[in-house]
Amino acid sequence: MVNIFYRATRYDIKGKLYLKTMEKYYIVDTGLRNALLGFHGGDYGHVLENIVYLELLRRGYEVGVGKLGALEVDFIASKPDQKIYYQVSVSILDEKTRERELEPLRKIWDQYEKVILTMDRTYIKDFDGIRNVNIVDFLLDDAQ
């Protein structure tokens, strides 16, 4: 069977259970998405999120979308011995954007790894225990 879309189920982080509604869908080929919907120059965030989702699947993770009250964590990547929370943003150089993107990760009280992936190239590699990683570096490094 060939998949055109992948479904990411929503996981309630606080309640520790999968939700039956509000899942998100990611397309196998972003070129197909652009052909169907047209390419919008301001749409980079969705494209980057789609790329990261597919990469996490390729690395063997089970991938869901996290829900924490009204907040969303882009991805919860799980393997039997590992769990990592990911936020994806084009840039967090703007302080308001940075705070908005970091807020859900800061509110997670467990000790699993938390990572924010951006296109930014900066010397800041950590925000209070949340790793700041360039998306290109993430894609090129299978160890992450």
Image (cartoon, helix red, strand yellow):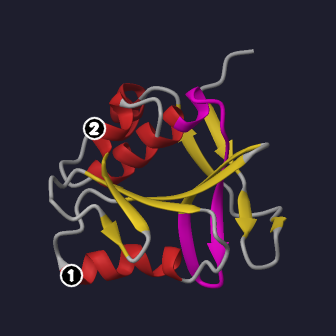
Q: Is residue 84 above or below residue 26?
A: below
Q: Is residue 38 visible?
A: no
Whichever of labels 1 and 2 marks the residue nearer the N terminus, that label is 1
Q: Which residue matches tag 2? A: 136
* Mark linked to residue 95: 1
Q: Position of residue 103 (x, y in %)?
A: 45, 81
Which residue appears at 20% of the width and 81% of the height?
Answer: 95
Which residue appears at 45% of the width and 59% of the height?
Answer: 115
Q: Amino acid at mark 2?
A: Val
Report if residue 118 lies within the magenta region.
Answer: no
Q: Crowdedness of circle 1 by 10 Å Cα count: few (<14), some, many (20+)?
A: few
In magenta, the rendered stretch is: 56-73
Query: Left or right: 73 with respect to 124?
Result: right
Nearer-the-camera pick, 93 or 47: 93
Which residue appears at 60% of the width and 33% of the height?
Answer: 57
Q: Amino acid at mark 1?
A: Glu
Q: Position of residue 34 (x, y in %)?
A: 33, 34
Nearer-the-camera pick, 24 or 69: 69
Dot 1: element: helix
**Numbered disc total:** 2
Q: Position of residue 22 (x, y in %)?
A: 69, 63
